[in-house]
Amino acid sequence: MAKKFVVAMMMHETNTFSPLPTPIESFARSGDLTGPKAIKEAEGTNTSLGGFIEIARKAGAEFTVPMAASANPSGLVTKAAYEQMTAAIVEEIKKGCDAVLLALHGAMVAEHYDDGEGELLNRIRKIAPDVPIAVALDFHTQMTDDMIKGATVIAGYRTYPHIDMADTARRAGRTLMRALAGEVEPMMVWGNRPIMSSSLVHTPSREPMKTLMGMANHAEDTGQVLNASVFGGFPQADIPHLALSSVIVCDKRTAEGEILLNKILDTAWEKREGFLFHPEPLSVQVARAKSLDGGPVVMADHGDNTASGGTQDVMSVIEEAMKQGLEDACAGPICDPGCVEQMIKAGVGAEITLELGGKIDMPAMGLKGKPLTVTGKVKAITDGQFTVTGPMATGTTIRMGRTAVLDTGKIQIVVSEKRAEPFDLGVFTHCGIDPRRKKYVLIKSRQHFRAGFEPIAKHIVMCDGDGCTASDLKLFKYERVKRPLYPFDLDMRLGRNEA
């Protein structure tokens, strides 16, 4: 008889400093939340859910998808949304299954739980204590004991930007399939170090994280261990379990896993100074961009990054670019439903003056919304929908809501009803703008933009714009993190401090 699998996705990276709530409606950005339509939406895409569906198909298993929920990073997940998603998954598992494949994030914070993923796994274990569970996690996971106790196998993304989401699910899924076949008996060891690193400087493509991820990848790829993952953590969350961590999946509990784990974590601590972010005045950064020859010059505003919980309506970088007279530029998308409505009513070709962006205050950051007055012609109006063709989330459908382009003569600004991080050129090309032909490309992103925009960029300038996703951790007021914690406690001494 065919095995029965439950495959589900419940993904959210929670920025506890973001003013944007996260209700159940936010999780439907990927289409239907359940059933055949959800499967059709995800199958064949470069996502964790797509990877797990592939694993289930290859195993010849019957499978259901009781929940396919993924929301843009934002503030706390509402209690109602969390309970609806977890109940759907738990109730399906309660019917009986041979294995569970979960595409989770690892940094979900709900109104009533700091560890959204750990609580889900706790609930599953209460009704199915022995069912094998494979979990694919984001690189920015905040690892906890409950996640380890609840899962059978854990694998995390190796890349940032995340171009290996489907492959991460395959890695976790293959180990689980071997366990189901009786070939291996997975056991996990894990630990952490009290390092809160800015996500702008902890990408595995560069040091110091490159060395750590290289150790994990080599051990897994050469078969020394079943799976090995390093997690940078997500610093825009004021929670007790924020830290840099690593998880090693071994065939039974072997000393080799413990040795690798401690080597990775001890190396992280030795390299901790490399995880520090050094801010710079925005005016200096824009002036640097202006001085560069050739283009495109990609200017990445990481202070208002949608994929870290930003409002996507802070105008500080665009304002400074206009002040310094940058021309032949495109920018966006800016999330401002009201301005989109005004442009649609005015129609293509109409000249219009807008109070663009700046509609949302950020109390946790002490920032008030500051709209920017801009005048231009409505260049285009679209439904804001396109299919990703770049290497990150390939094949998925992006739904930005109704979208319009305002051409000021010097800058073409894309304005959308919904938030969407520009990691794919489609945010511009779908509405008639070719960023490859622009001198300047102003986008709101921290690292994911590199997936689609780094290949076309002659220069990249990181911009310290305002917002609740700033990379300077001194701008955030942390009250619940566990101390001592680097870099707040710079003189701390660490012995062996595993989880």
Image (cartoon, rainbow, N blue to C red):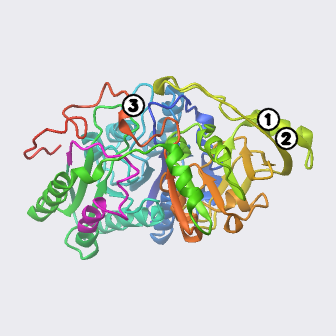
- Reading the image, the residue beneath label 1 is 354
* Crowding at mark 3 (Cα within 10 Å: few <14, some 14-19, many 20+): some
Q: What kind of residue is marked 2?
A: Met
Q: Quadrant of the N terminus?
A: bottom left
Instruction: List x then y, in percent, for residue 212.
Output: 25, 62
Checking the image for residue 476, the label placed there is: 3
Q: Quadrant of residue 343?
A: top right
Residue kind at label 1, given as amino acid type: Leu
At a point 57% along the width and 60% down the height, the residue shown is 291
Q: Earlier in the sequence, mark 2 or mark 1?
A: 2
Residue 45 visible in the snapshot: no
User: Quick check: can you spot residue 336?
Assistant: yes
Q: Nearer the viewer, residue 52 or 202?
A: 202
Residue bearing mark 2: 343
- Which segment did they paint magenta? 192-216
| Residue in view at x 23 percent, y 67 percent | 215
